């Protein structure tokens, strides 16, 4: 299954490595003998289907998720059936990549309003008075 990304980028199925392994969880003896966990492996760093600008953006934004070799791994063992895990793994990988390529809004610095400052100072004063009232009186 090819992955479509924003900007018309398509990752062919041949670039995505597929591994199966045994998964834990519910299923009794079934999980001990079937390999239902699906792991997708895709090399962001060496993918020929990515333009350089997209590759740089993905490498920067997905740095925490990538291996040392620049590979993105997605493992799914949610379901007991391999086909459902495979479909979910492709969905998750596509969601991760789309989220990384989404344009992030510029942060506009703001300042607290005059009323907000006054409310904060009033609350601080009330808290200080409350604590002052809890003190034991001085015996001088």
Image: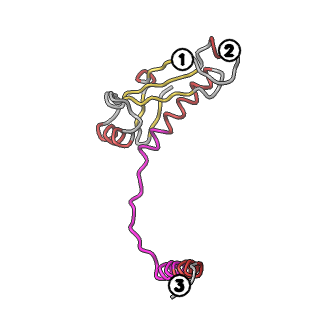
Chain-order first, disc 2 or disc 3: 2
In which quarter of the view is residue 73 placed? top left
Q: Nearer the viewer, mark 1 or mark 3?
A: 3
- Residue beneath label 1, please? 21
Q: Position of residue 60 (x, y in %)?
A: 33, 42
- Residue beneath label 3, please? 138
Residue in the image at 53% along x and 17% along y: 20
- Residue beneath label 2, please? 30
In which quarter of the view is residue 14 placed? top left
Chain-order first, disc 1 or disc 2: 1
The local secondary structure at tag 2 comes to helix
Q: Does the magenta stretch include residue 73?
A: no
Residue in the image at 54% along x and 17% along y: 21
The local secondary structure at tag 1 comes to strand
Label 2 packing within 10 angstroms: few (<14), some (14-19), many (20+): some
Q: Residue furthest right?
A: 28
In the rendered structure, the answer to whether residue 37 lies left or right of residue 69 reads right
Q: Residue furthest left?
A: 52
- Front position in the image: 129 or 49: 129
Q: Which residues lie in the magenta part?
A: 96-124
Q: Are marks 1 and 3 in contact (CB under 8 Å)?
A: no
Q: Does the magenta stretch include residue 97?
A: yes
């Amino acid at each position: 299954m090819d992955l479509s990304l924003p900007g018309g980028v398509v990752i062919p199925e041949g670039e995505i490595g597929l591994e199966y392994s045994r998964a834990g969880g519910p299923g009794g003896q079934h999980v001990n003998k079937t390999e239902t966990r699906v792991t997708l492996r895709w090399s962001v760093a060496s993918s020929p289907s990515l333009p350089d600008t997209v590759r740089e953006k993905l490498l920067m934004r997905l740095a925490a998720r990538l291996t040392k070799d620049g590979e993105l791994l997605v493992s799914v063992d949610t379901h007991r059936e391999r086909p459902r895990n495979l479909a979910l793994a492709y969905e998750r990988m596509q969601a991760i990549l789309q989220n990384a390529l989404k344009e992030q809004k510029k942060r506009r610095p703001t300042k607290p309003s005059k009323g907000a400052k006054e409310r904060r100072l009033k609350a601080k004063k009330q808290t200080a008075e409350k604590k002052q009232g809890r003190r034991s009186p001085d015996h001088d």
